[in-house]
Image: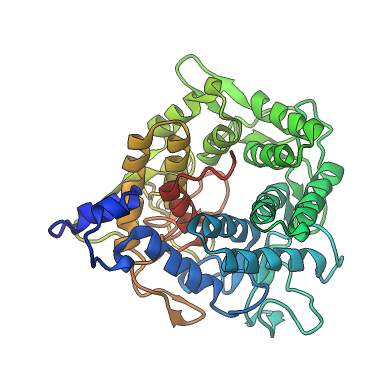
């Protein structure tokens, strides 16, 4: 965030899509923010395989999740690569999702798990000796931390990414894969509750989850819409609209429902505001964006409890939920992990909010929100690795400025470079609404 001559202005102009006009001849392309972001995506995608189907590791090694590749992150990376014009890598990840769907060690062909392992590891009684796939083609469903749940939101995002690949390549495999994922949600996750919509899916043990997510239903609305499934599209939309809460002073979306019959009255989350706006683009819900600005704004400085910022670093952005700033700085986010900084900025969410503002016709506000993410890419995450190998410097966005508690579960985000944070940043630069 230190301005050196005109370099900062050039970087921001490049991030705003004005490269041709703003960058003088001879300026190194590596200085362009989306070029740097792409270098990080490439490093994570090519870390263990450079040919054929694969999935990218989601976080740099420093977060401690080993070679875990989350389905959501992989799908979002496909969409970012298509925006960047890298069809080859987008196809390789899309083929990885198709392969994972048809080579599950438990059920063969079915829905996608929450995550997979993409490199050898040993953790307790679990081990994997291969990269993405074993010689017999099976994959390590869940990875080292057993993220074996089947979430409807993951099926939605994977389906959207596959449909985007089908539009670009006309390869029928991607359409068939997306259709199969949508059909699983339709057949296995329809909620019997009065609110309608679809449930979260199945937990790690394979048992149905009755709870529902506003975010997942908004994502499913777009998937069903693109497939032309009107009944399913309308069902998902009805749940989202019923989650809209009109208050005396502010309006927002509930995060979902614990039972299909009542709305969650706890934490209000960033994604529950942005995803419905991006998917439905209904002017009646514009207040959700105002809610984010008023209720989810934080500023992280070195003086904040447990902040990992140093010197004169200061970041203003968006947090994960209304309960994140109320997290106890004296209690670890999870056992054995750091204590939270209540003022930590969630860069994935901040970039996502920038995408929502641009979709709302507010380009100046969108640029304002994106600025700290551009700064974070240039300043945070130094010395991080993937598979033990150094990542390119000043490339890729960390998930959060400091350890961040989500507020509604024992989970958080950390200053580790992250695929989803970087992919949303790319989409904010390119003006792509992945849920439109």
Indicate the position of residue 124 as horizontal and vertical percent values. 66, 79
Is residue 328 among the parts visible in the rendering? no
Indicate the quadrant where residue 46 lies. bottom right
Is residue 361 among the parts visible in the rendering? yes
Indicate the position of residue 193 as horizontal and vertical percent values. 80, 30
Q: Toward the viewer: 267 or 234?
A: 234
The mark tally for this picture is: 0
Q: Work out which residue is located at the far top of the displayed protein and give it.
A: 248
- Which residue is drawn at the image coordinates 64% and 69% (left, top)? 92
Question: From the viewer's perspective, is residue 4 above or below residue 431?
Answer: below
Question: From the viewer's perspective, is residue 257 above or below residue 49?
Answer: above
- Which residue is drawn at the image coordinates 78% and 32% (left, top)? 230
Colouring = rainbow
Question: From the viewer's perspective, is residue 123 above or below residue 365?
Answer: below
Indicate the position of residue 197 as horizontal and vertical percent values. 75, 33
Indicate the quadrant where residue 98 lies. bottom right
Indicate the position of residue 91 as horizontal and vertical percent values. 64, 65
Q: Toward the viewer: 385 or 321?
A: 385
- Which residue is drawn at the image coordinates 36% and 46% (left, top)? 370
Q: Work out which residue is located at the far left of the displayed protein and give it.
A: 5
Q: Toward the viewer: 169 or 401?
A: 169
Q: Quadrant of the N terminus?
A: bottom left
Image-based side of 48 in relation to 213, left or right: left
Q: Quadrant of the C terminus?
A: top right
Q: Toward the viewer: 79 or 270?
A: 79
Image-based side of 302 in relation to 435, left or right: left
């Amino acid at each position: 965030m230190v301005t050196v001559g005109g370099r900062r202005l050039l970087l921001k102009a490049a991030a705003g899509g004005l490269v041709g006009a703003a960058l003088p001849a001879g300026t190194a392309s590596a200085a362009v923010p989306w070029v740097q972001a792409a270098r990080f995506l490439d490093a994570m995608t090519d870390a263990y395989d450079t040919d054929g189907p694969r999935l990218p590791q989601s976080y740099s090694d420093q977060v401690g999740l080993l070679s875990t590749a989350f389905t959501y992150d992989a799908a979002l990376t496909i969409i970012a690569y298509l925006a960047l014009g890298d069809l080859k890598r987008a196809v390789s990840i899309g083929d990885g999702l198709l392969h994972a769907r048809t080579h599950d060690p438990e059920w063969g062909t079915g829905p996608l798990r929450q995550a997979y392992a993409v490199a050898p590891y040993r953790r307790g009684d679990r081990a994997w000796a291969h990269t993405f796939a074993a010689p017999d083609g099976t994959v390590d469903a869940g990875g080292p931390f057993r993220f074996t749940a089947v979430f409807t939101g993951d099926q939605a995002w994977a389906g959207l990414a596959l449909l985007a690949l089908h539009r670009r390549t006309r390869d029928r495999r991607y359409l068939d894969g997306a259709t199969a994922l949508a059909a699983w949600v339709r057949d296995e996750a329809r909620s019997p509750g009065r609110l309608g919509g679809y449930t979260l899916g199945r937990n790690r043990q394979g048992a149905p989850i009755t709870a529902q997510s506003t975010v997942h239903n908004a994502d499913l609305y777009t998937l069903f819409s693109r497939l032309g499934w009107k009944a399913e599209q309308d069902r998902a939309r009805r749940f989202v609209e019923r989650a809209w809460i009109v208050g005396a002073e502010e309006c927002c979306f509930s995060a979902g429902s614990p039972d299909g019959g009542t709305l969650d009255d706890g934490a209000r989350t960033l994604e529950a505001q942005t995803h419905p706006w991006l998917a439905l683009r209904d002017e009646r819900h514009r207040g959700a964006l105002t809610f984010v600005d008023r209720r989810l704004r934080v500023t992280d400085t070195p003086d904040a409890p447990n902040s990992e910022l140093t010197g004169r670093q200061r970041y203003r952005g968006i947090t994960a939920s209304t309960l994140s700033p109320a997290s106890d700085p004296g209690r670890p986010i999870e056992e054995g992990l750091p204590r939270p900084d209540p003022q930590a900025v969630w860069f994935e969410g901040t970039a996502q909010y920038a995408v929502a503002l641009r979709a709302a016709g507010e380009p100046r506000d969108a640029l304002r929100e994106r600025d700290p993410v551009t700064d974070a890419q240039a300043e945070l995450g130094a010395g991080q690795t993937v598979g033990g190998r150094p990542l390119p410097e000043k490339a890729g966005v960390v998930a959060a400025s400091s350890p961040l508690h989500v507020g509604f579960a024992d989970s958080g985000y950390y200053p580790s470079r992250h695929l989803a944070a970087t992919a949303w940043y790319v989409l904010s630069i390119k003006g792509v609404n992945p849920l439109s």
